[in-house]
Amino acid sequence: MSSSSSSGLTFKLHPLVIVNISDHYTRVKSQMNPPVTSTATTSSSSTTTNNSNGSGDGGVTAVSAAAPPPRVYGCVIGVQRGRIVEIFNSFELLYDPVTHSLDRAFLEKKQELYKKVFPHFYILGWYSTGSDAEEFDMHIHKALMDINESPVYVLLNPLINPAQKDLPVTIYESELHVIDGIPQLIFVRSSYTIETVEAERISVDHVAHLKPSDGGSAATQLAAHLTSIHSAIKMLNSRIRVLHHYLVAMQKGEIPCENSLLRQVSSLLRRLPAIESEKFQDDFLMEYNDTLLITYLAMFTNCSSTMNELVDKFNTAYDRHSRRGGRTAFI
Amino acid sequence: MDPYPSSSSLIAQKTWELENNIITVDTPPASTNSAADASSDSIFYYDETAQAKFQQDRPWVNDPHYFRRVKISALALLKMVVHARSGGTIEVMGLMQGKTDGDAIIVMDAFALPVEGTETRVNAQADAYEYMVDYSQTNKQAGRLENVVGWYHSHPGYGCWLSGIDVSTQMLNQQFQEPFLAVVIDPTRTVSAGKVEIGAFRTYPEGYKPPDDPVSEYQTIPLNKIEDFGVHCKQYYALDITYFKSSLDCHLLDLLWNKYWVNTLSSSPLLGNADYVAGQISDLAEKLEQAENQLAHSRFGPLVAPPQRKKEEESQLAKITRDSAKITVEQVHGLMSQVIKDILFNSIRQSSRPRTEGSGPEPMVES
């Protein structure tokens, strides 16, 4: 159920979808397990109210022991252009786990509403939370097949695992495989990349790192800007080091040579320098000069403003002494 | 960093936290957001009875300045900014859902409205109302129980403030749909400055005089809007905005960074904002001309009467200087990114070609 997909489609996921799913899940979870507060009287008040301080967590888990975190379901929408599937947004769906049926009317209603605001997006698939794709997911998948002939299934694993290094989001596609002579639909994993627009990136950055929201001094702005670039470069550096280490080990013979990997690394290296043409140099220097020009203009404005203030102050000082009229102000 | 913890470093840290609106989660062991545990998700719980009671009490009726803070969830912020940006140069608007908590309004989610933004429109049209009702209904079914608690709209390129139409709309809202909040987002400035430009406002009721002049952060307003801004800027006040996210959000966003750093490095703000910056500079030029005319008149002013100028108001020229400094800073930041990228990816030369620039950091990959 988890071999890699061979459909050749590339998937691009926007962070908004991830935050959407996470919010949906958190909402449903917290409605089901009301938090222990000093005023609320829940069944978990058996844990002595004195330690309601740190046991907010304990209280929740005590209640949630009775109700395991629910699965939430929803639809993902986006655009498909040729081989590239770009998932932009998502919304919730009503699913009855008892009868394993989707609420169709709800889906259509929601789809209509979203069509009005985002006319270019259409339903690309659905999402759910959990740790692995399950049997019944295929039912939902098949149900959506009449809207989109090959829907995608986005699965988010909501369990917080601090040791995890990778995003707990997997994208599955369905493929027709012949198993035991019977053609069956099974889920296959696909890879995806995270795609973003500049505005989305800035707000995700903002929320993730809680950057200073007010203007702050120029120094803090500069620090913030350079810090973000620095951390990005640090990531790049660590990735390259890993590759380097791997290659050195391969050279020493500790790891068997893998030609496909070597080919990929070599093509990567050949991409540097990224751009090297006369035109690029010219454009680059022109941009450089434009920025320097703007700085120059700003300096000029600053100087003339200061000069103006100086003259004003001089005028005021000078005027106080001139008792007789008829004397023009010194300009 | 100080090797031994002293009071000065603690003070410095507190100051930094204060300046940057670091939200300490409201559980008694005040943990910073990076260590948000499951109990911080209590904000996501919608307490129907408490909200209904609050609605009945209506403590805001007697105090026009009652609400002082706004807490926006990560999801709401993301949705609003993306929607505002997708409108391009057209104003877009939408509604926010959430609840109240003492003197804070909490925004949990936002959704867009299919309304074309024009300057003359006061209220959303009838089909937007229908949309609102339908959307709220489906949301309640899907498990989002909060009510509409405000509206947001975008001012692409001209800053976060309430125009005359906005002020009258909000005053109407505050009469009939309390508690209600107005949020303004500027997506163009967000992308240009690299930080989110957002403002939350509530209007004063008609005829109310605010006790003290609120000190708001200075922002540059283009010339064609400055009159609208000036006439109404005393009729509303700004609220403090803080953000919150759930523990799962924290975790996911941390992991997202593993894939995201590519986008940070590859963003080129100079290219994206070229036309906005050009607009800013031409606007600045016009303001400069206007200021020059003003100053030319006052050349003969000192003879007739001393120039009537309030001490607090800065002269036009000083404001222009500030604006130009701001534009320059953004440009320089953009250029820095470009130069860094150039050094990173372009200064590597094949071993056959001679190295032209001997300076600069070592390339990360040996040729």
Image: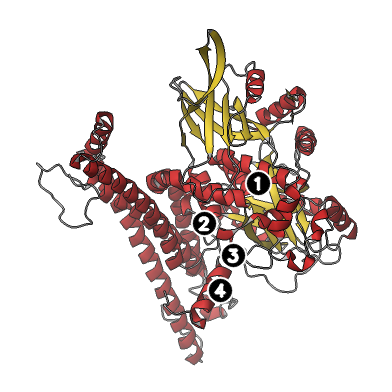
Badge 4 element: helix
Residue annotated with mark 1: B153
Q: Are marks 2 and 4 in contact (CB under 8 Å)?
A: no
Is A79 left, or right, of B164 in this rendering? left
Q: Residues within 10 Å of mark 2 (few under 14, many from 20)?
A: some
Q: Residue at x 62, y 32 (%)?
A: A127
Residue type at the position of mark 1: His
Residue A249 sits above or below residue A151 on the image: below
Residue type at the position of mark 3: Asn
Discs 1 and 2 lie in a common subunit: no
Discs 2 and 4 lie in a common subunit: no
Structural distance between the alpha carbons of marks 1 and 3: 23 Å
Label 1 lies in what chain?
B
> In this view, which residue lies farthest toward the right?
B56
Q: Mark 3 against mark 4, which lies toward the viewer?
A: 4
Is A235 left, or right, of A89 in this rendering? left
Q: Which mark is residue A27?
A: none
Which quarter of the figure has residue B122?
Answer: top right
Q: Nearer the viewer, residue B363 or B156?
A: B363
Structural distance between the alpha carbons of marks 2 and 4: 17 Å
Label 3 lies in what chain?
B
Q: Residues within 10 Å of mark 4 (few under 14, many from 20)?
A: few
Is B152 left, or right, of A301 in this rendering? right
Residue annotated with mark 4: B14
Q: Are marks 2 and 3 in contact (CB under 8 Å)?
A: no
Residue B143 sits above or below residue A326 on the image: above
Label 2 lies in what chain?
A
